[in-house]
Amino acid sequence: MTETGDRRPNLRASRMAFLDSPMLMKLVVFFSSTLFVITTVNSETQCRNFKSIISFGDSLADTGNLLGLSDPNALPHVAFPPYGETFFHKPTGRFSDGRLIIDFIAEFLGFPLVPPFYGSKNANFEKGVNFAVGGATAMERSVLEERGINFAYTNVSLGVQLTSFKESLPKLCGSPSECRDMIENALILMGEIGGNDYNYAFFVSKPVDEIKEMVPLVITTISSAIKELIGMGGRTFLVPGDFPLGCSVTYLTLYQTTNTEAYDPLTGCLTWLNEFSQYYNKLLQEELVKLRKLYPHVNIIYADYYNSVSRLFQEPTKYGFEARPLPACCGLGGSYNFTFGEKCGFEGVEACNDPSKYVNWDGVHLTESAYRWIAEGLLKGPYAFPPFDWSCLTSEIKNIGSSDTHSIL
């Protein structure tokens, strides 16, 4: 009894000495550092040396698909000047005066510009393939028609694009293992897609509360496509949100009002429409958080188009644009150089002398200069979450475009 009693105070003293020891402090620092590293890795993307770009979406990413799908005797307005005048010096099917966000991403990675899939003959898809089609929706046309939305510009929904991709795999890669490797090492651009689902609803005068009911359906459609591509091997996705609709010339014209309270006093954009865009973007981001938890090995990056564009309207001169940035460069008439039925590309509708000074191009889409700023905000921050990690890329690739006197990448 006496021996046991003598040992207990000594054991207690040893424990107290260990708690105060430098060894414990080292262990605490080690485990804290380890936890910090794990948390940091989980909240950021892993650097990947992408081998190609795979793109789905609508006119914001269309590099010529709508043109390829069109009847040669009934070409869309983007087949005519002044589309493409700034960089390509001819129309290419892009809905802008020059390059798009996808083009700047490709240049940054050292890839050739991503060719359109539809209508392409003998195109080289080794470094990328693009299925985005101008006017495309996330949901199927039948789903929209069931809701009384009959404004079909094209029937190439996200589901149709995904089916085209799967059917094209034998041409893009030689074997199932090669296809999986291709998809795994690709940067997959999931949109922007879904904006037209809302556009068509607004254009047929659906009330905003009814359009809000469509948001979960659009997001589920996008999420399902991402899940399917993950199952095929996809490891890195860039998923854009919506632009600030209230700054679109089309909507500014459609919903023009004498009620000054309807407009943002800083930008002149329609507040209620921007609130709708923010509502959609918030729910989209919540869905992406769920996907990241389901697939922790996959990089799912949210592209914040909304704030990346908003800054151009908030401080236009800071980014080289005119002090009054809302009017379209290519258009005709009205307060915003836009008239319904008088599209850019139509006879008699001309472009401004210097598109680089304009944010809005044709009333719906943006100029090359605006897309350049958006691309930089995604690639170099802070408008991609989690941010891209480019540490494994060579300086030669990261500096791509430096020879272009207009480049800011």
Image (cartoon, rainbow, N blue to C red):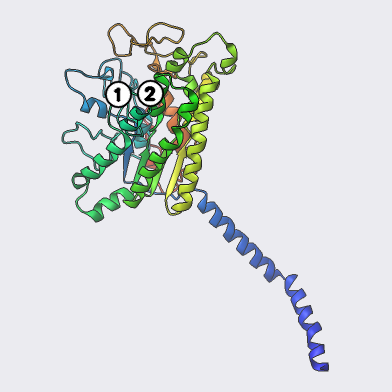
- Front residue of 105/250: it is 250
Q: Residue furthest right?
A: 2
User: Which residue corresponds to mark 1?
Assistant: 153
Query: Which quarter shows the C terminus?
Result: top left
Residue 342 is situated, as x and y percent measured from the top left of the image, at 33, 10
Q: Earlier in the sequence, mark 1 or mark 2?
A: 1
From mark 1 to mark 2, how far is it between C-alphas? 9 Å
Which type of secondary structure does the marked residue at label 2 adopt?
helix
Q: Compared with residue 55, is residue 296 higher up or lower down, i.e. above or below?
A: below
Q: Which quarter of the picture shows residue 199?
A: top left
- Front residue of 153/44: it is 153
Task: Report if residue 52 is visible in the image.
Answer: yes
| Label 1 CA crowd tier, 10 Å (few <14, some 14–19, many 20+) | few
Identify which residue is drawn at 40% across, 24% down: 201
**Dot 1 and dot 2 residues touching (CB under 8 Å):** yes
Is residue 7 toward the left or the right of residue 407 in the image?
right
Label drawn at residue 374: none
User: Which residue corresponds to mark 2?
Assistant: 200
Residue 368 is situated, as x and y percent measured from the top left of the image, at 38, 23
Please state which amino acid type lies under the numbered disc 2. Answer: Tyr
Which type of secondary structure does the marked residue at label 1 adopt?
loop
| Label 2 CA crowd tier, 10 Å (few <14, some 14–19, many 20+) | some
Residue 53 is situated, as x and y percent measured from the top left of the image, at 32, 41
Identify which residue is drawn at 48% across, 20% down: 247
Q: Compared with residue 340, is residue 236 higher up or lower down, i.e. above or below?
A: below
Q: Which quarter of the picture shows residue 162?
A: top left
Identify which residue is drawn at 23% across, 25% down: 67
Please state which amino acid type lies under the numbered disc 1. Answer: Tyr
Identify which residue is drawn at 45% across, 17% down: 251
